[in-house]
């Protein structure tokens, strides 16, 4: 991957300039703008297997994996074929299809606690809909979420708790009303007591607790022993709907997701990304009793013109079927992740750089600070400036990491052991260059 590279990215720069005039920040999702690492984002033309190519023709080993879905690599032949064949029969009907039934059957028959599932078009829609259903089902209003967890850009999730105020939220994004903010309470991840206190103070109005069972949006932070079990018990005691947001972990850490890895079953689960193999999809599901509150069976309204879209269903079903039929994929991914994590750890140790590495399955979080990293405040201690330097050192050496210090590496099983070795070589060169300068 060290072949001649066109640096300074003239084509990407020109595109970014054009984009910035007509798209806010030049991108359709903020992290793509390289805001936290600086510089111009490289514009991508194509991808195959574990590799991306940019507008300059530079090739990269890809650790974005479309932020999760490319578990088997880009342009997976069976997925591409399914999309092509399905597209030939039209891209959308606005009427039910057999594919949607097969998809729902595949998921409900595989995953714990999901009796029924509804397809939507993104992870954001999935979590927004899930809390609406939880509120409709319980007749209560407030939800607890966790600092540093991400559930998309629904109003209810863009809230930081006002300090010291247990019952009052405070909008952290302009445009979110106080009325919405006051129903979202923020607890500390991996701190059961912080949840118990919020529940105690709002006992009669707690509809749901929503969390990433393995946090992936503040690097990778696994749940401490007893944390998920404690939440489960608390929800049972107070009739609160426990929602696992498995948009990132579902079908990634295990075919049955974090629920299987930790042996804790939620009342509702949300999915996204992976179940569409890169096409726009999300889904929410759960116990029949709860899901029967959804229209048209029940009174909670939720709908979507393109929901269950045939292309998305064809792609997602093909990927999920392949994953279900080849459980070895998960072992292989885990092995690759641990080789990468150990290699990075050794390099950082050699160069005396404080670090903590969290690894669950194929999710790897590297923090440039002393460990342990168990909460958002811990994660926030990571050296962001150093991350930016490492990011650019890797980019120019042909490795595209996610452009944010708070994202896990997303591995695909298309990565060969040579790719991982090349990644580690680039990493060591990068660290050597940074420490020498
Ligand atoms: N939940 C989690 C855990 C996520 O990681 C994300 C996206 N990164 C979302 C929800 C939102 O999904 P989307 O971007 O598809 O709206």
Image (cartoon, grey):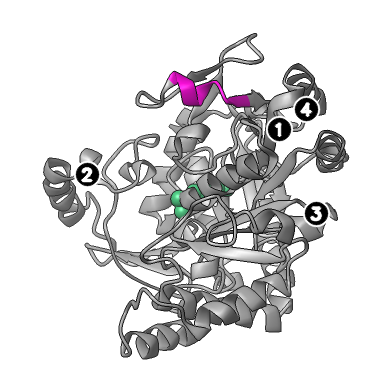
Marks 1 and 2, how far apart at CA: 33 Å
Q: Which residues are magenta?
A: 178-185
Mark 1 or mark 4: which is in front?
Answer: 4
Under circle 1, the secondary element is: loop
Under circle 3, the secondary element is: loop
Q: Quadrant of residue 149?
A: top right
Mark sitting earlier along the chain (1/2): 2
List x then y, in percent, for residue 90: 30, 84
Q: Which residue is mark 2?
A: 26
Mark sitting earlier along the chain (4/2): 2
| Residue 88 in view, yes or no | yes
231 or 268, which lies in front?
Answer: 268
- The structure residue drawn at horizontal position 58% and vertical position 77%, both measured from the top left corner, is 103
Q: Which residue is mark 1?
A: 373
Mark sitting earlier along the chain (3/2): 2
Q: Is residue 58 above or below residue 380?
A: below
Dot 1 beta carbon under 8 Å from ligand 1:
no
Mark sitting earlier along the chain (1/4): 4
Mark 1 or mark 2: which is in front?
Answer: 2
Image quadrant holding the C terminus, namely top left
Marks 3 and 1, how far apart at CA: 25 Å
Q: Which residue is mark 4?
A: 191
Q: Which residue is mark 3?
A: 265
Mark 3 or mark 1: which is in front?
Answer: 3
Tell me if residue 202 is in the magenta stretch. no
Mark 3 or mark 2: which is in front?
Answer: 3
Asked if the residue under mark 4 is in contact with the one under mark 3, i.e. CB atoms within 8 Å, the reply is: no
Mark sitting earlier along the chain (3/4): 4
Q: Is residue 53 above or below residue 363?
A: below
């Amino acid at each position: 991957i060290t072949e001649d590279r066109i640096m300074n990215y003239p084509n990407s720069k020109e595109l970014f300039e054009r984009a910035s005039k007509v798209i806010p920040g030049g991108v359709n999702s903020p992290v793509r703008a390289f805001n936290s690492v600086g510089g111009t984002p490289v514009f991508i033309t194509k991808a195959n297997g574990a590799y991306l190519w940019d507008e300059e023709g530079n090739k990269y080993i890809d650790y974005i994996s479309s932020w999760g879905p490319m578990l088997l690599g880009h342009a997976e032949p069976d997925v591409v074929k399914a999309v092509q064949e399905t597209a030939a029969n039209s891209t959308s009907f606005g009427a039910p299809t057999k594919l949607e039934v097969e998809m729902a059957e595949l998921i409900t028959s595989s995953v714990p606690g999901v009796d029924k599932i509804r397809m939507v078009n993104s992870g954001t829609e999935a979590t927004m809909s899930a809390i609406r259903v939880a509120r409709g089902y319980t007749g209560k209003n407030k939800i607890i979420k966790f600092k540093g967890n991400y559930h998309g850009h629904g109003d209810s999730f863009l809230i930081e708790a006002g300090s010291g105020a247990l019952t009052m939220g405070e909008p952290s994004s302009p445009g979110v009303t106080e009325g919405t903010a006051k129903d979202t309470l923020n607890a500390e991840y991996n701190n059961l007591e912080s949840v118990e206190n919020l529940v105690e103070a709002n006992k009669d109005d707690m509809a749901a607790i929503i969390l990433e069972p393995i946090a992936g949006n503040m690097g990778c932070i696994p749940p401490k022993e007893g944390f998920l079990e404690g939440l489960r018990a608390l929800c049972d005691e107070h009739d609160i709907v426990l929602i696992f947001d498995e948009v990132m972990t579902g079908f990634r850490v295990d075919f049955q997701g974090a629920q299987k890895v930790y042996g804790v079953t939620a009342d509702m689960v949300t999915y996204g990304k992976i179940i569409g193999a890169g096409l726009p999809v999300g889904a929410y599901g759960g116990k029949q009793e709860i899901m029967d509150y959804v229209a048209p069976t029940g009174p909670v309204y939720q709908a979507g013109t393109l929901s269950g879209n045939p292309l998305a269903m064809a792609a997602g079903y093909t990927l999920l079927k392949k994953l279900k039929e080849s459980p070895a994929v998960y072992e292989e991914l885990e092995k690759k992740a641990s080789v990468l994590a150990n290699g990075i750890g050794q390099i950082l140790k050699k160069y005396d750089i404080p670090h903590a590495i969290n690894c669950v399955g194929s999710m790897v979080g590297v923090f440039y600070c002393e460990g342990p990293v168990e909460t958002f405040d811990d994660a926030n201690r990571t050296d962001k400036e150093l991350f930016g330097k490492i990011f650019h050192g890797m980019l120019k050496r042909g490795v595209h990491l996610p452009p944010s210090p708070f994202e896990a590496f997303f591995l695909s099983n298309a990565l060969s052991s040579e790719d991982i070795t090349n990644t580690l070589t680039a990493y060591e060169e990068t660290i050597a260059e940074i420490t020498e300068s």
